[in-house]
Image: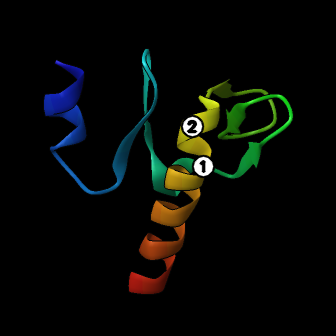
Amino acid sequence: SMKSIEELDDRFIQCHRSYIVNLPNVTQIDRHENLVYFSKEVYCLITRRKIKTVLAKMEQLNQNI
């Protein structure tokens, strides 16, 4: 299930009901288009409600490095 995959590692987070992302691979979050970018051509959707959670988790991971 999606929940079991998300629980495998702290770096995984569900950003949409259909997507789980690996946070170290995220390069940009577009708040206006609700997209998470991994490179210029590779992206997926993110829900508006999850944007703040994803950004906070990314900040937390960056502090632990």
Contact between labelled residues 1 and 2, with CB atoms less than 8 Å apart: no
Give the percent coordinates (x, y) of residue 40. Answer: 81, 36
Task: Name which residue lies at 27% across and 57% down.
Answer: 10
Task: Name which residue lies at 42% across and 18% down.
Answer: 17
Please tell me which of labels 2 and 1 falls first in the chain: 1
SS at badge 2: helix
In the rendered image, the vertical position of residue 52 relative to residue 49, given as above or below = below
Inter-mark Cα distance, 2 to 1:
18 Å
Q: Which mark is residue 26?
A: 1
Task: Name which residue lies at 80% across and 41% down.
Answer: 30
Q: Amino acid at mark 2?
A: Arg
In-front residue for pair 40/59: 59
Q: Which mark is residue 49?
A: 2
Task: Name which residue lies at 47% across and 84% down.
Answer: 63
- Say few, some or many: other residues with alpha carbon within 10 Å of mark 1 (under 14 / 14 to 19 / 20 or more): some
In-front residue for pair 38/33: 33
* Residue 65 showing in the rendered view: no
* Residue 35 showing in the rendered view: yes
Side (left or right) of 12 relative to 55: left
Side (left or right) of 35 relative to 15: right
Front disc: 2 or 1: 2
The quadrant in which the C terminus is found is bottom left
Give the percent coordinates (x, y) of residue 4. Answer: 13, 31
Side (left or right) of 42 relative to 15: right
In the rendered image, the vertical position of residue 30 relative to residue 35, given as above or below = below
Give the percent coordinates (x, y) of residue 18. Answer: 43, 15
- Say few, some or many: other residues with alpha carbon within 10 Å of mark 2 (under 14 / 14 to 19 / 20 or more): few
Q: Residue furthest front?
A: 49
Q: Amino acid at mark 1?
A: Val
SS at badge 1: loop
